[in-house]
Amino acid sequence: MFLAPFFGVLSGWALLDEMLSFSIVVGGLFIISGIYLVNRNVHQKKNLREGNVKKVVGN
């Protein structure tokens, strides 16, 4: 869902020879970095929960 604009621009560049401007490249980098930051936070919370369970169980 969040990558649709990114791949739309990338497909237009690759298939239709559309020009990529500096602002479009920077926007793509913002999209990718935002998705990374959102997913990184989810993995950290999951690891914290699993760590707490291991402490209680004693593994």
Image (tube, rainbow, N blue to C red):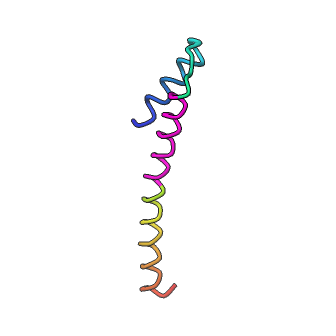
Picture layout, residue 40 above or below residue 8: below
At 45% across and 46% down in the image, what residue appears? 34
30 in the magenta segment: yes
Q: Which residues are magenta?
A: 23-39
Question: Is 28 located above or below residue 21 in the figure?
Answer: below
Q: Total label count?
A: 0
Report if residue 47 lies within the magenta region. Answer: no
For the view shown, which residue lies furthest in the top direction? 16
In the image as oriented, which residue stretches furthest toward the left? 1
Please tell me which residue is depicted at 54% across the width and 21% down the height of the picture.
11
Q: Is residue 52 left or right of residue 24?
A: left
Q: Quadrant of residue 13?
A: top right
Q: Residue at x 39, y 35 (%)?
A: 1
Query: In the image, residue 15 lies at what x, y percent?
Result: 58, 14
Please, is residue 29 above or below residue 53 in the view?
above
Whether 11 is drawn above or below 6: the answer is above
**39 vs 17, nearest the viewer:** 17
* Residue 29, x across and y down, in percent: 53, 38
Residue at position x 57%, y 16% in the image: 19
Percent across and percent down for residue 50 are 45, 73
The prevailing secondary structure element of the residues shown in magenta is: helix
Q: Nearer the viewer, residue 13 or 58?
A: 13
Q: Position of residue 41 (x, y in %)?
A: 44, 59
